[in-house]
Structure formats: C-alpha cells, structure tokens
Image (cartoon, rainbow, N blue to C red):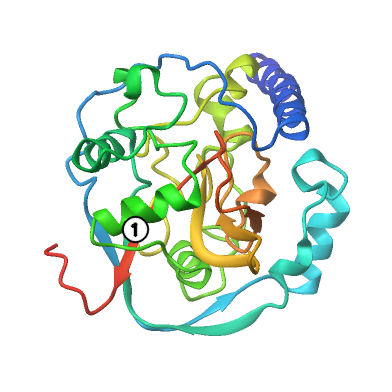
Amino acid sequence: MIQGRRRETRRHLLLIGIGLGLVLFIVSPYGGYPPSIVISHSLNKNPDQDKMIFIPAGEFIMGSSNEEVEKVKKEYGHRGDFVGYNFDKERPKRTVYVKAFYIDKYEVTNAQYQEFIDATGHPAPRHWEGGTYDPHKANYPVIKVSWLDAKAYAQWAGKRLPTEEEWEKAARGDDGRIYPWGDKFNPENAGTAEGILYIILSPRDLLRYAAAVDEFKGDKSPYGVYDMAGNVMEWTDSWFERGKSKVVKGAAWVHLGPRARSAAADGIQPEGLSHLVGFRCATDGEIDIGI
C-alpha cells in the first residue's frame, strides 16, 4: 500500500514537473539563464576530469530509421520538446566510418573555463557575477557559451570541437543502441526532465537545474564517456544548416527522454547563447595527449 502511494506520488510529481519544464522550453528554449540554486557538492575538480577517452577507428550505426522516428513522432511529436524539431535530420539510419579520435570524458566545467579566461582574457559568460562562476558550481558544465566561445576554448586547450559523427559514435558505440546505455530509456540514468525528479523530487527545481558533470553515473557510453544523454546539450563542429546553424547533440535537463537519444540533433546559430547548452572537446586519434 505504501509503495503504491509512493509510486502514485512520484507519478504526479513527474507530470507536474514535466509540464513546468515544457512551459520553460516552449517559452524560451534558448533564453535567459534562470536563477541558480545551491546544491551541495565538492568544490574541487573531479580527479579524472581532465582525461579524454580514446574512440577507435571504425564503422558505427548513425541516425534513426523511419520506424524509430515515426514511433517518437506519434507519442511525442505534439509536445514542446519536438515542436518545430526537424526529424529528417536524424534520417536515414546508416553506417558511417569515423577515424580514431579522443573525446573529453566529461563536459567542460566552469572551473576549466575559468582557467581559459584567466589565461587569455576571453570574456566570461554573461551570467557570471563579477566575471566568475558560482563557487558552488566549479564542477558544473559551463553554459551560455556560444559556438565561437567553445571553439576558442578548444583551440586554447590544444583541442577542437567534435564533429556530429564523432559525438554520436562516442555516445552510442558501434552497435546501434539508441541511448548510451542501451535501447530503453531509463529516467534514473540521465539528467533529463524525468531524471531530475529521481534525485530532487521538486518540480520547481526542474526549471533551474543542471547537474555536476559526475552526478549521473548511469549516463555513461560504451566507451566510458559521461553525460551524452542529458544534463546540457553540446556544441559540435558540424553544420546543421550550412552557414546558418551548428549541430548541438544530447538533451538538457528540461527535455523528455526521447530527446536524449544519441541520434537526436538540433541546430543553433554559432553566436547563440543558451542556459541549456555546453560543450566538450576532441582531438585527432594520432595526437599524443599524455593520458
């Protein structure tokens, strides 16, 4: 009886939270940065935060089949996450060869971006008060950075932004799985609208929460790359619409599970800023990065 009531309570919270999250997404999917909240977390960097993961050369299955797309469209196509979403960008499901490369194990954090600012004088994100990040969020992904900002950071770090193909292979492996962990969405694994409720259980927090980069241990790809399903969307170096917008991959904390599919993609202008978007870096496979 008690377990049944708990499940019912969780279901109601989920519905309320998702509703609030969709309101935010519909009104301003790439809008202003919401007020921050303080969530207890170590101020120190994760000890392996600077590591990169080697992704071997080879073929992988990229994109979505017509059947997969139509299934998502039928159930979620009318919801805020997919209003105006271009499903054709996922199709067809195809085999793609990618050269060997390295990719960051985690999204670039506020602390890492601060080092870049300190070394180069690059402007800080606009929401950083006094030109620095909230000290409680050193290990959170840097957000409200444009593609141009992300590219500048990558060049300073001796890296680059991953292509869409590289990003998707690092996320889903070479066996065609839909999510980094498999074919079935698990709300406990990733920082999406459903997943946030599993660790906070507050619909209010759904509107303003991006987790630390090592918060969701289940959001791990076959290669050991984290947060490629949820937390924040990520810039890539590929064009979504040539000359107009760049591909962003992955879901953010306001999105429903289907947006966390590895094949999902959206486009944002290179100069665009969003509280939903961060990035990670890559390097060519033959580069010695000392790991």
Q: Quadrant of residue 101?
A: bottom left
In depth, the one of 103 and 59 nearer the eye is 103
Q: Is residue 133 visible?
A: no
Amino acid on which disc 1 is placed: Gly
State the image coordinates of residue 174 (x, y, percent, origin top left). 48, 76
Label 1 neighbour load within 10 Å: few <14, some 14-19, many 20+: some
Image quadrant for the N terminus? Answer: top right
Q: Above or below — where is 153 with respect to 222?
A: above
| Residue under the point 65% across and 18% down | 203
In depth, the one of 128 and 266 nearer the eye is 128
State the image coordinates of residue 83 (x, y, percent, origin top left). 82, 46
| Residue under the point 77% across and 60% down | 86
Q: Above or below — where is 83 with respect to 144?
A: below
SS class, disc 1: loop
| Residue under the point 62% across and 23% down | 207
Residue 209 placement, left or right of 5: left
State the image coordinates of residue 221 (x, y, percent, origin top left). 42, 58
Q: Which residue is mark 1?
A: 224
- Check the image and name the residue furthest to the left: 290
Image quadrant for the C terminus? Answer: bottom left
Residue 35 placement, left or right of 128: right
In depth, the one of 85 and 28 nearer the eye is 28
For the image, the number of numbered tags is 1
| Residue under the point 60% across and 23% down | 206
Residue 5 placement, left or right of 157: right
Q: Quadrant of residue 3?
A: top right
